[in-house]
Structure formats: structure tokens, C-alpha cells
Amino acid sequence: MTRSRRIQFDAQKISNLGIERRLRRDPEVAELLGRMVDPKAHPSILASIPGYLAATGTLGEKERAKVLDALGMFARDQIVPLAGYDAVADRVRSVRLSMLDALHSGAEI
């Protein structure tokens, strides 16, 4: 999730399927990943983990609150948006947008 660049042999879609399967069947892993949501975490972690949790229906209230706190901090403290690799979307994008997408999609599940 924290790679500095992509290569032609990336298998992110296949990796995502494995990660999502594991999250669906192992609540401990979902809980561990949820703990990683922290405004001081690597941007790629923040861009990816909420999306994985939302995609698997494991974005709980605690995680949602942490995402909202991070978004509030970013809105208050950032002038230039933070970018990170969003593993779910398989591209580099604004961390705020990735987190907002996760909150929105998590609400629909």
C-alpha cells in the first residue's frame, strides 16, 4: 500500500480480492486495520484502509469517527491536499477524496 511507484506487473485488483475476502471472514484483521486509521499515518494507508473496510462492510462507528476526525484535521491544517496511493481505486489521489468515498460507500452497505 505504500509503494512509491507502480510497475507494469502490478496485480492490485487480485490483491484487493484477497484482502477483501480476508476482511469479510476475519473480524480481527478488520479491527487491526481500523486501528491504523490515524491522521499521522502514511497517506497511502489513509487513502486505502477506510476503502477496504467500507467495501467489506466492516467500517464500524469507531472507524467512521476516526475518518471524520482525520478529515476535520486535514480541512483545518492543510493548504495543499495530501495525496496517497488508494489501493481500492488503484491510483494516486487526494486522501480526502478517498476517505470521503469510503464514508459514502460505507453508509450504503
Image: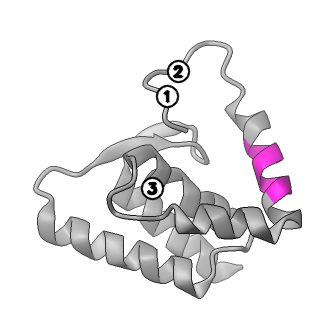
Instruction: Name the residue located 67 percent from the left edge and 70 percent from the top edge.
Output: 31
**Amino acid, disc 1:** Arg
Is disc 2 surrounded by few (<14), some (14 to 19) or many (20+) residues within 10 Å?
Answer: few
Label 3 sits on what residue type? Leu
Estimate how packed mark 3 is, as few (under 14), some (14 to 19) or many (20 or more) residues with alpha carbons within 10 Å: many
Residue extending farthest to the top is 8
Residue 93 visible, this orientation: no
Query: Residue 101 location in percent, x, y?
Result: 50, 65
Residue 15 in picture, x, y percent from top left: 75, 37
Q: Which residue is mark 2?
A: 6
Foreground of the two, 8 or 32 = 32
User: Disc 1 designates what residue?
Assistant: 3
Q: Position of residue 75 (x, y in %)?
A: 20, 69
The three-letter code of the residue at mark 2 reads: Arg
- Which one is in front, 45 or 17? 45
Question: Is 66 or 11 nearer to us in this picture?
Answer: 66
Q: Residue at x 45, y 83 (%)?
A: 65
- Badge 3 is on which residue? 46
Residue range in magenta is: 16-22
